[in-house]
Image (spheres, rainbow, N blue to C red):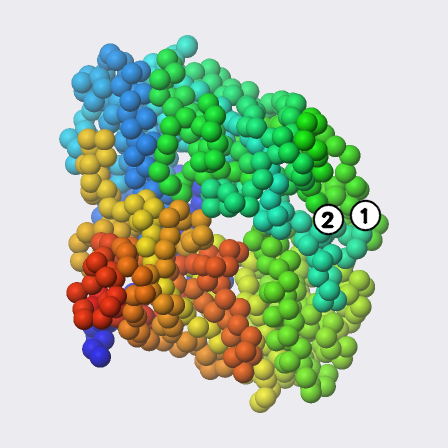
């Protein structure tokens, strides 16, 4: 079989090979600094963006300069994994803003667009005025401002719109803009509504940039909520309650120390429609806050809502969403409500999109038991950037954030998915069996936990009373050490047998292990900083094993011993539609942004869309079309190296293939009997998605081969020097 890769292929080592931690717009603003001595006369700013190498854990700041002559490889990755493309593909959003702007901007005036992005709203406003009047577009993020210039030029709007690459609170009337603006058009909203700095942005705009009683698009936003019961949501935050049902002898949350591990108190964006069957509404939707864009908002607010319970159950969470009224007359709306809501709060229908979801706020502990007909008091508070909730009910002291006398003033903050994994009985039993088997026959073993697994550390110390455990905790560091100090007694061992190095080192030596060779090198693998990344980026474990090889004993056991890269061809119409190439967006040509924003579609060769991390179960309509197949094997007992694999895959279902979903199955033992999968059926991990440039019809109605359903050849190359996975395919 001929390779799909050219023989001369050299994996890219450009900036695109490393994952960017794309900071939020507000965060990025703080890294733009004035460096006039280092700049040419045409440029006065530099932007610093963080680049992380997931296989080493090392990070560096990359400088982005304000010139248009940077090579493509330096520009594209900065925006390819952002949500801009998804937003521009949201036709419901675009039509709503267009309609509202046309209803609002009815004569020549001065329009200010804050957070202009590609300039879509600015161009809508300029068109509505017949290219008369004045439009000022403010975009603080330099890579996006540079892209916007190209979009404006493509649409012959460069002279009609003044683009300013500054934060809106840096603008000065008479310096940056000619006068106060009559109309504000802006879309700086996240799933929570306030998280992108809506309130301080509006405050400054009303104080310094807008006329009195300005027109605004949007006009108003209203947040709504609903009390729900959901075992799934409960498992995402109450490790203490879940662990009480597990009998494996490991106490991540010892009795009386319920608050030692917790989930941050905040609203978590989530596609709640995906768990509709696992959510039991305990109230009707209720209004929480109202924010008027046309007047100056307050920084803080409180409200109390008397909510009537409509069914018996336990209140585990509040699901919230918002509704925009975009025009003053109340004719144009946009809602992020879940689809099960059938009330005036859910106005219109929108397609699946990933940039705006619902939000979930967890109530601590096992939830509040309620009966149908009773009323509960919900207290809601907002700051400038977030909303929080509290049920007015007496809860046990162990359910508060106050620490009890058994632990110090310390708490370990974990993600909801990590809490759920640690509480999963099947996962725990698999890991327990693997470690127990590995320890058999070993006397006084030295066990090194390479990653950030607190569970493996406790497990190794518990199962062997003579073992010495060295936990590296590359992400948790001193937090991991403090956690162990607080739970050792409850787990039946002392810190004399557990050690966490005080300083992070590039590689351990025999001096660090007190002259003893390592008998076991283990990991889940789980790295604190890698959460939410592509699944093969946890191959950092393989990299670590290679670095530690000089201090391993001859019969050292490595767990997991292998990583198997699995894949499946899938129908993903909603996800593909949200990431596909742009053309005409409400009458404006956006085709120039496709390559930079990482679109899938007809891109010029050799450009292609990037791998993206997604929780497939939350990606709207999905369907498996092929058998699950293996592409690559990563042997952790050998030094890390380039890997190449090929598979011919049969389609077992007819339909439209939109791409391939990839994940890693970790083989925990040499007998291949204990496997921990991170595939789509397991909700607590993200998978990697490679979308096709063009959807392909497969199966009975679409195949061109003699087989019943058709097939495809898939070929993959993993290059550790760049931490990059390259995938090629050919449909048969």
Q: Position of residue 161 (x, y in %)?
A: 24, 26
> Quarter of the image holding residue 486?
bottom right
Q: Position of residue 129 (x, y in %)?
A: 22, 17
> Quarter of the image holding residue 482?
bottom right
In this view, 454 is above or below 587: below
- Please give the name of the residue rendered at 18% of the width and 58% of the height, measured from the top-left corner: 605
- Please give the name of the residue rendered at 54% of the width and 62% of the height, measured from the top-left corner: 527
Q: CA distance from mark 2 to mark 1?
A: 8 Å
In this view, 43 is above or below 180: below
Q: Position of residue 700 (x, y in %)?
A: 23, 61
Whether residue 361 is visible, yes or no, is no
| The C terminus lies in quadrant | bottom left
Mark toward the start of the polypeptide (2 vs 1): 2
- Please give the name of the residue rendered at 59% of the width and 84% of the height, measured from the top-left corner: 556
- Please give the name of the residue rendered at 37% of the width and 13% of the height, measured from the top-left corner: 329
Q: Secondary structure at mark 2?
A: loop
Q: Which residue is mark 1?
A: 404
In this view, 20 is above or below 311: below
Q: Position of residue 189 (x, y in %)?
A: 43, 32
587 left or right, relative to 193? left
Q: Which residue is mark 2?
A: 259
Quick check: marks 2 and 1 in contact, CB under 8 Å? yes
Residue 620 versus residue 408: which sits nearer the camera?
620
Whether residue 498 is visible, yes or no, is yes
């Amino acid at each position: 079989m001929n390779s799909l890769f050219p023989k001369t292929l050299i994996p890219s080592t450009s900036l695109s090979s490393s994952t960017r931690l794309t900071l939020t717009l507000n965060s990025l603003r703080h890294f733009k600094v004035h460096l006039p001595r280092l700049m040419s006369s045409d440029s006065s700013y530099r932007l610093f963006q963080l680049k992380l190498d997931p296989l080493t854990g090392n990070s560096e700041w990359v400088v982005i300069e304000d010139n248009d002559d940077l090579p493509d490889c330096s520009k594209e990755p900065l925006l390819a994994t952002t949500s801009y493309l998804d937003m521009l593909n949201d036709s419901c959003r675009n039509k709503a803003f267009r309609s509202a702007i046309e209803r609002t901007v009815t004569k020549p005036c001065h329009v200010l667009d804050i957070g202009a992005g590609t300039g879509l709203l600015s161009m809508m406003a300029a068109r509505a005025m017949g290219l008369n009047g004045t439009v000022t577009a403010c975009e603080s993020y330099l890579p996006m401002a540079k892209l916007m210039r190209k979009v404006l030029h493509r649409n012959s709007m460069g002279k009609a719109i003044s683009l300013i690459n500054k934060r809106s609170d840096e603008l000065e009337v008479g310096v940056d803009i000619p006068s106060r603006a009559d109309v504000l058009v802006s879309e700086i909203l996240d799933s929570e509504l306030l998280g992108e700095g809506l309130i301080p942005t509006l405050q400054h705009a009303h104080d310094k940039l807008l006329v009195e009683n300005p027109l605004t698009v949007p006009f108003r936003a209203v947040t709504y909520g609903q009390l729900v019961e959901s075992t799934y949501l409960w498992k995402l935050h109450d490790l203490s309650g879940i662990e009480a049902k597990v009998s494996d002898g490991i106490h991540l949350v010892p009795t009386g120390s319920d608050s030692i591990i917790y989930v941050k108190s905040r609203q978590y964006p989530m596609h709640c429609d995906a768990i509709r069957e696992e959510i039991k509404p305990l109230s009707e939707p209720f209004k929480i806050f109202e924010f008027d864009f046309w007047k100056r908002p307050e920084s803080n607010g409180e409200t109390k809502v008397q909510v009537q319970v409509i069914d018996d159950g336990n209140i585990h969470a509040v699901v919230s969403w918002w509704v925009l009224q975009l025009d003053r007359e109340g004719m144009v709306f946009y809602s992020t409500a879940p689809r099960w809501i059938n009330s005036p709060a859910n106005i219109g229908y929108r397609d699946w999109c990933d940039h705006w979801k619902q939000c979930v706020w967890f109530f601590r502990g096992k939830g509040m038991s309620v009966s149908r007909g009773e009323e509960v008091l919900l207290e809601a508070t907002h700051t400038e950037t977030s909303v929080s909730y509290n049920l007015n009910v007496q809860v046990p002291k162990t359910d508060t954030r106050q620490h009890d006398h058994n632990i110090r003033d310390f708490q370990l903050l974990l993600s909801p998915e990590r809490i759920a994994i640690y509480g999963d009985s099947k996962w725990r039993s698999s890991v327990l069996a693997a470690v127990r088997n590995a320890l058999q026959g070993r006397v006084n073993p030295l066990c090194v936990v390479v990653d950030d697994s607190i569970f493996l550390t406790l497990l190794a110390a518990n199962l062997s009373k003579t073992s010495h455990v060295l936990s590296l905790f590359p992400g948790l560091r001193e937090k991991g050490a403090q956690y162990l100090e607080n739970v050792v007694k409850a787990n039946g061992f002392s810190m004399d047998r557990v050690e966490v190095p005080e300083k992070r080192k590039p590689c351990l030596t025999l001096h660090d292990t007190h002259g003893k060779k390592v008998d076991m090198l283990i990991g889940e693998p789980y790295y604190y900083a890698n959460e939410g990344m592509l699944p093969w980026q946890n191959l950092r474990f393989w990299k670590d094993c290679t670095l530690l090889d000089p201090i391993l004993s001859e019969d050292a056991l490595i767990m997991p011993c292998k990583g198997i890269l699995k894949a499946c061809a899938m129908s993903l119409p909603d996800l593909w539609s949200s990431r596909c190439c742009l053309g005409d967006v409400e009458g404006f040509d956006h085709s120039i942004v496709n390559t930079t924003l990482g679109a899938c579609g007809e891109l010029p060769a050799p450009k292609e869309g990037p791998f993206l991390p997604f929780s497939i179960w939350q990606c709207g309509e999905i369907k498996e079309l092929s058998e699950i197949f293996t592409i690559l094997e990563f042997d952790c007992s050998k030094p890390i190296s380039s890997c190449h694999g090929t598979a011919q895959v049969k389609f077992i279902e007819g339909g439209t293939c939109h791409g391939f979903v990839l994940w890693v199955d970790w083989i925990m033992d040499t007998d291949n009997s204990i496997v921990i999968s991170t595939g789509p059926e397991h909700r607590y991990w993200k998978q990697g998605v490679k979308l096709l440039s063009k959807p392909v019809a497969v199966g009975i109605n679409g195949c061109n081969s003699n087989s019943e359903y058709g097939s495809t050849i898939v070929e993959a190359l993993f290059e550790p020097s760049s931490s990059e996975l390259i995938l090629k395919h050919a449909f048969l």
